[in-house]
Image (tube, grey):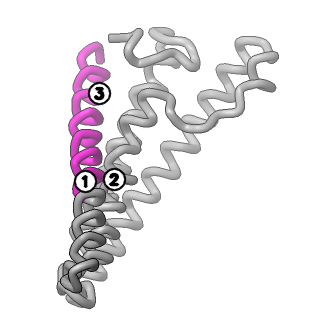
């Protein structure tokens, strides 16, 4: 289990790099489209591409954000509780998160399969939707793995609730 956090962190960092490049692509595409519209030559399908890239940005950054505790958390009330109670609350929220992201991954796969079977594509560029949904499913599964590794480390006593992954490396 000692190498699992490092491997999961590497995967999350790789997905975050993809998210960063997708964000850069969204920005460049939007800027280019705005400039070309001034000359009456807009880029065909910009709205669709920005939507696809936005899905990549949001989903591929989730695991990295989870590892770095970048989500909004309300710890004011929990911090005043005894450590045993804090641990129970933390582990309960981890289990709920695992369930939520496993469900999100499963439903994204099912939805992607439906789109794949029906041949659903975007209106302008005719790009298929199912790869985007499979990407969301994959990144949700990675978040599940992050939460499971985190859960196991806390239960095994190798880390306390709210530890930082970089401290554990």
| Spot occupied by residue 60 in the image (x, y as percentages of width and height) | 32, 48
Tell me: 127 left or right of 78.
left
Which residue is pictured at 31% across the width and 68% down the height?
A: 50
* Secondary element at tag 2: helix
Judge whether 81 appears above or below 93 on screen. above
Query: Which span is picked out in magenta?
Result: 1-25
Which callout, 1 or 3, points at the residue further toward the start of the chain?
Answer: 3
Which callout, 3 or 2, points at the residue further toward the start of the chain?
Answer: 3
Judge whether 107 appears above or below 127 on screen. above
| Spot occupied by residue 97 in the image (x, y as percentages of width and height) | 53, 43
Q: Quadrant of residue 4?
A: top left
Which callout, 1 or 2, points at the residue further toward the start of the chain?
Answer: 1
Tell me: 131 left or right of 144.
left
Which residue is pictured at 75% across the width and 18% down the height?
A: 79
Q: Which residue is mark 3?
A: 9
Q: Which residue is mark 1?
A: 22
Q: Indicate which label's residue lies in the foreground, 1 or 3.
A: 1
* Secondary element at tag 3: helix
Tell me: 109 left or right of 87.
left
Is 139 magenta? The answer is no
Residue 67 visible in the current orientation: yes
Residue 117 visible in the current orientation: no
Disc on res. 57: 2
């Amino acid at each position: 289990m000692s190498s699992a956090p490092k491997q999961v962190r590497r995967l999350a960092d790789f997905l975050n790099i993809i998210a960063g490049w997708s964000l850069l692509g969204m920005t460049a595409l939007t800027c280019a489209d705005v400039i070309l519209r001034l000359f009456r030559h807009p880029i065909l399908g910009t709205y669709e591409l920005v939507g696809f890239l936005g899905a990549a940005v949001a989903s591929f950054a989730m695991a990295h954000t989870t590892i770095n505790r970048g989500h909004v958390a309300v710890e004011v009330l929990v911090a005043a509780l005894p450590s045993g109670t804090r641990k129970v609350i933390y582990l309960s929220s981890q289990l709920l998160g695992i369930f939520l992201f496993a469900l999100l991954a499963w439903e994204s796969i099912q939805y992607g399969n439906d789109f794949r079977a029906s041949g659903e594509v975007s209106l302008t560029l005719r790009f298929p939707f199912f790869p985007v949904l499979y990407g969301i499913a994959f990144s949700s599964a990675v978040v599940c793995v992050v939460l499971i590794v985190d859960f196991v480390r806390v239960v095994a006593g190798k880390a306390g609730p709210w530890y930082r992954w970089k401290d554990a490396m």
